[in-house]
Image (tube, rainbow, N blue to C red):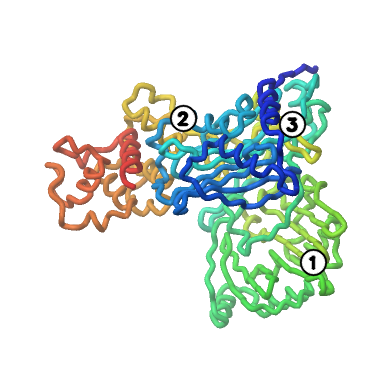
Amino acid sequence: MKKKITAVLTAAMTASAALAAAMPVSFAADGTGYEDIILIVKNKLNIPEEYTEFENSGRYESDGKTVYSFSWSTEDDAKQIYVSCTGDGFISHYGSNDRDRDSDPYDSLSMDDAKAEDTARDFIVQADPELADIISLERSTYSYGGISYSIKAEFYGIEYYRPVGSITVDKDYTVSDMNVNIPDVNDPGAAEYIDYDEAAELYKSKIGIKTEYMTYFDDDTLNVFPAYRSIDDKAIDAVTGEVLKVGNVYREEYTFAANTASDESSGGGGGNYKELNESEMEETAVLNGLISADDALSYINERTGLGLEPDNTSLYTAAGRRYVYSFAGGEDWVEIDAHNGDIISLHAVIEPEEKDTTKLAGYGFGDSGSAKLLIERLAPSNGSAFEYDDQEKDDTAGENETRKTESSEFIYKVNGLALNGVTAQLYKYTDNGRIRYNLQIPSIEVYKSAEYADPSSFMDTGELIYSDPMFAELKYIDTPDGVKAAYIANSFMKNAVTGAEVNYRNEETDGGVIEYSDIAGHWAEDTAKRLAASGIGFEGGVLVPDAKVTAGDVKEIMSEVFGSRTEKYIEKADNETITRLEAAEMLIKCEGLDAVAAMDIYAQPYSDIETNYGTTAILKGYGVIDGSVDTFRPNDALTRAEFLQLVYNTLVNIK
């Protein structure tokens, strides 16, 4: 079944036409009309008279348009305004800088949300009137020194699939930064779009979802859980029902970081790097049954033909306590598993004036069969365990007369399912005769002994995924062939056994949005909402404001605000309650005021504080705790609402 979706943004088109009529002169290659466009932009933005100094920053091409950049500043250069615009006066970037401006990470907590949003919208419409009827603003969870918004746009009744820009409002309710990039969307006319039910069926049959094992490390302990994940780079054409590639993609060069196993979200988890001298490496190799550094280098040169002569050799432990040798010489570096001798990563460059005599040159990086043979050559212990991943075949990889990209990816499977992040990747780039090799073949030893949930225990995807009416939405998306209307899945990751929405550490999540259903009318409602808007608070949908706050609760919030280092200040078990004085002492330490608090210079701040006056005296002086009462009640247990209020007061009052 098909339905017609027609909507015309008459106001936006009229505004655009009016703007074009008001600005008949555009920049030409020879700079014609330069003064006119500067004057138009200056008037649109109401540049203050104190900005007397002007500077032309040049021009560049972007998406087929010429963009011009310039700036104004005060005579003493204390304040600057930076602007980029196209030849028709559309302002794509605005930025202001004031060296005397005092900013704090949590200025947004004391700002008026409605006033800030009005300021942002008014500025966008003032700068680019043609956007008035097509944009909406969505507050970002966190921004430094103010409130930031994503700018979303709707064309012909259909929303664009990602933000078209951003804008930040400072605590004085002035805009400090704006970026806008409007896609070229053609009028669909009387196009007929397939309905949601048909799109969902097509999505299920032609695209599907990813079912894979996610992996992460806690210190050196591997954790595995099964997950259903959305496929975010494909969509269903809303007119034809065919599969579309999302994004105007050209695969850029990849250079793998030296310790690739340390990425938590892709199967890593720390490891330790320590520079060892030659004798220390030899001793470590003997104690841990490793191959020697000399043998490791011999394996590398024998298998690759690089003739690597390292300037630096190091040994470190990767996730799962696997030792790795790293050899670097010139622009080349190679890493090798010190236990079994498998090469796990490689980066090498052949300059145009050099002949590629490496053994890598004999393999086709874009040919799955040839690439698999290379993996088995470089990693003889585990290379055969990888399977070609045809789902990641990139048909858009670029190739022209001077530039060529060849690539293949291979996955490691358990129970027929891929392990996310445990992927062998091979890339070869040729650019004007210069060849760059980048390879990654992760060690799989640590994954062989892990426990994996049996697929028979997984929830049914039809009920969990496809029956959700918000599984996919009709949006305008970028494709290699321009902007098109398509049904694209809303990004998700669900534990395949429990069905819960989770993050990369299998922790249940509300999608990053903190909301409470039990605080309406509570004295802490405003505080809880302000903190939540900045990403500070408890997930789960309820606050339970009058329940006693536990050490685990405090660790969660303190880590969000001050970082994980703060956990060392909390010595109680997670289920134990926290007293008012204990919370005050933790905040003093987190703010780095403990040394000042220890000084014997304070008068007794409260009648029931008999020793160590500094902690409560400092917080009372800053206005973090109530200074109008005589007692502090230091040994009373703190409620969750009281704790949030204490955190809020600290962030707002201690700068």
Name the residue tied to disc 1: 434
Q: Residues within 10 Å of mark 2 (few under 14, many from 20)?
A: some
| Tag 3 residue | 185
Looking at marks 2 and 3 on the same chain, the residue that comes earlier in the sequence is marked by 3
551 and 654: which one is in front?
654
Which residue position is annotated with label 2? 515
User: Which three-letter amino acid code belongs to the residue tagged 1?
Assistant: Arg
Q: Is residue 482 above or below residue 18?
A: below
Residue 534 position, x and y percent, is 45, 38
The dot on residue 471 is none
Q: Secondary structure at mark 3?
A: loop
Depth check, front residue: 575 or 597: 597
Quadrant position of the N terminus in the picture: top right
- The amino acid at mark 3 is Val
Taking 433 as reference, is 472 left or right? left
Q: Residues within 10 Å of mark 1 (few under 14, many from 20)?
A: some
User: Could you say whether the residue bearing mark 1 is in a helix, strand or loop?
Assistant: strand
| Residue that lies at the very extreme toward the bottom in this rendered image | 279
Quarter of the figure with residue 157: top right
Q: CA distance from mark 2 to mark 3?
A: 35 Å
Image coordinates for residue 26, horizontal then vertical, percent: 71, 39
**Amino acid type, mark 2:** Glu
Residue 448 can be seen in this image:
yes
Which residue appears at 74% of the width and 18% of the height? 6
Mark 1–mark 2 Cα distance, whole angstroms, equals: 53 Å
Q: Give percent across and percent down for residue 361.
A: 84, 67
Residue 204 in view = no
